[in-house]
Image (cartoon, rainbow, N blue to C red):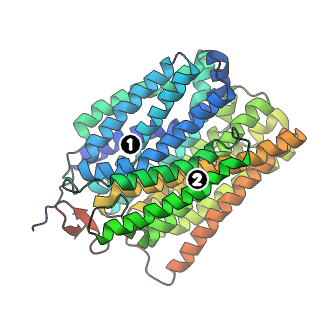
């Protein structure tokens, strides 16, 4: 059987196509945090109860996480361009429907659909990068993707605050969703013209439907008590965790059986034999558990505790968002040379920045906190950019192209589970102290210290990985190990720089 080598698009079109992917990724990740500052507007303008507000935030994360791996595998098998465009179109239409929702119930329904569409888009981006970019270019492209992941999450509160301040609290929440429309339509039109029609490796593979059901049920059972931690007050909800572990164990056994029988699995378990992928996914899961929580708590504390407006709350985290972009740009340029060292430095910077915010709350309590926390947030933002961007590159750059969508889905599923777990754990610390003692300042400080503790776990993992690498060669980010490369008709061929 002859090997058919995929021909990358010309440089100019390749980078423009990446811009389309990043625009779609930006709005889908922006929606994980932009809604946080709009919750008071939702309550006032739509009469949304606390339960509805919770589902507007957590329902999106839930369906986002459920869709990632199956959608990534479908893209691997049937074509990433088509899967990307379908997901983007559905996301844009769902955003319009959310903005036009006439009742809280319909808003929750459309928000669940929007999250599913976001989960369809996200893994195609990493898969398309694998397919379009060889060697050093791939590392640079993943570096830009890491920038978008970090900045979009951090920029959500600011964008939401600007929109609500401009439109007003009664209808401001609608524009939190409407803002996706011009970007979504423009990206879809550009995608039709720019996204390459690359050969598909898995056209004749059978889709692992039973694997999808097992994984979906396991992720659902794991995430549901996490995202509903504040609403379901009883301990019975945690009975779903062992159920989730059993389902995920069954999924692992099923996928091994698929491999033994020579069938195409939903997730190729050989991916976890790559140290860069396994450690990177664990670091990503742990970091997002600490990182995402900060913005959730900070928005609550500034608006409910200190009386900040939505705009002022968003402006307070502006230093973090800007610094994240700077840190990611630095990390993207240096990751090939320095590897995991950048992640260690970045995680240390984030922990230091958050500890600085805790200190600022002591030194400048009350409404002066916004100014006092600017420098610590700047330090934390640079650290975040130097964490997310290099870690994304190191985790995905050695993944085989014909499994890139599913691998990207696994990575981002970990991020979504980590975010939900972090909000559940750190949120419980915050709300428990608030309920028992009523001191918002102390509750916020304890919440931030809990986030720092989680981030330090990610730092320990990164340091352990760095120490292991000293006894063996560093990964060759410019190339790929033998047997791991483009697969167009089932035969692998390594990808080398300039191929």
Q: Nearer the viewer, residue 49 or 20?
A: 49
Name above or below for residue 93 compared with residue 392: above
Residue ID at (30%, 49%):
75
Structural crowding at the residue carrying mark 2, measured as other residues with C-alpha within 10 Å and reported as few (<14), some (14–19) or many (≥20): many
Element type where label 1 sits in the image: helix
Q: Nearer the viewer, residue 113 or 307?
A: 113
Mark 2 vs 1, N-terminal side:
1
Q: CA distance from mark 2 to mark 1?
A: 19 Å
* Residue 286 image-quadrant placement: bottom right
Structural crowding at the residue carrying mark 1, measured as other residues with C-alpha within 10 Å and reported as few (<14), some (14–19) or many (≥20): many
- Find residue 481 and report its horizontal and vertical position in percent: 32, 74
Residue bearing mark 2:
418
Residue bearing mark 1:
120
- Find residue 344 and report its horizontal and vertical position in percent: 59, 66
Residue ID at (40%, 61%):
396
Question: Can you say which quadrant of the picture contains the C terminus?
Answer: bottom left
Q: Which mark is residue 220?
A: none
Residue ID at (61%, 22%):
164
Using the rendered image of the protein, determine whether residue 140 is visible from the camera's viewpoint. Answer: no
- Find residue 441 and report its horizontal and vertical position in percent: 84, 41
Using the rendered image of the protein, determine whether residue 122 is visible from the camera's viewpoint. Answer: yes
């Amino acid at each position: 059987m002859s090997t058919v080598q995929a021909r990358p698009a010309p440089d100019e079109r390749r980078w423009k196509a990446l811009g389309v992917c990043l625009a779609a990724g930006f709005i889908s990740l922006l929606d994980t945090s932009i809604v946080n500052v709009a919750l008071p507007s939702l309550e006032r303008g739509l009469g949304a109860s606390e339960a509805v507000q919770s589902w507007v935030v957590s329902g999106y994360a839930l369906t986002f996480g459920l869709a990632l791996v199956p959608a990534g595998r479908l893209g691997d098998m049937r074509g990433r361009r088509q899967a990307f465009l379908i997901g983007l179109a559905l996301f844009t239409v769902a955003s319009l429907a959310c903005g036009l929702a006439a009742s809280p119930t319909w808003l929750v329904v459309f928000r669940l659909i929007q999250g599913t569409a976001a989960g369809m888009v996200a893994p195609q981006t990493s898969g398309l990068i694998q397919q379009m970019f060889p060697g050093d270019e791939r590392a640079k492209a993943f570096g830009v993707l890491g920038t978008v992941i970090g900045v979009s999450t951090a920029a959500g509160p600011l964008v939401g605050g600007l929109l609500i301040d401009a439109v007003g609290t009664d209808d401001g929440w609608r524009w939190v969703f409407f803002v996706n429309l011009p970007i979504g339509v423009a990206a879809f039109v550009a995608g039709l013209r720019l996204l390459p029609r690359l050969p598909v490796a898995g056209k004749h593979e059978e889709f692992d439907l039973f694997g999808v059901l097992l994984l979906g049920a396991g992720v659902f059972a794991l995430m549901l008590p996490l995202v509903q931690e504040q609403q379901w007050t009883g301990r019975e909800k945690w009975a779903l965790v062992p159920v989730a572990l059993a389902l995920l164990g069954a999924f692992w056994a099923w996928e091994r059986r698929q491999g033994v029988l020579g069938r195409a699995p939903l997730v190729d378990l050989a991916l976890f034999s790559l140290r860069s992928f396994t450690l990177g996914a664990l670091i990503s899961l742990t970091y997002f558990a600490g990182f995402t929580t900060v913005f959730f708590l900070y928005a609550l504390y500034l608006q409910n505790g200190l009386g900040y407006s939505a705009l002022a709350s968003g402006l307070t985290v502006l230093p973090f968002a800007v610094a994240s972009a700077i840190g990611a740009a630095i990390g993207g340029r240096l990751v090939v040379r320095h590897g995991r060292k950048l992640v260690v430095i970045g995680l240390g910077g984030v922990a230091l920045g958050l500890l600085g915010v805790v200190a600022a709350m002591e030194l400048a309590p009350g409404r002066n906190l916004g100014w006092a926390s600017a420098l610590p947030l700047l330090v934390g933002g640079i650290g975040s950019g130097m964490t997310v961007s290099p870690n994304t590159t190191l985790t995905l750059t050695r993944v085989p192209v014909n499994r890139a969508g599913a691998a990207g889905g696994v990575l981002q599923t970990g991020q979504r589970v980590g975010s939900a777990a972090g909000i559940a754990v750190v949120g419980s610390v915050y709300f428990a102290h608030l309920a028992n003692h009523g001191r918002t300042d102390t509750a916020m400080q304890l919440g931030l210290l809990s986030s720092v503790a989680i981030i330090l776990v990610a730092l320990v993992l990164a340091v352990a990985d760095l120490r292991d690498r000293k006894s063996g060669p560093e990964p060759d980010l410019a190339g790929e190990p033998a047997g791991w490369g483009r697969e167009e008709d089932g035969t692998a061929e390594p990808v080398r720089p300039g191929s």
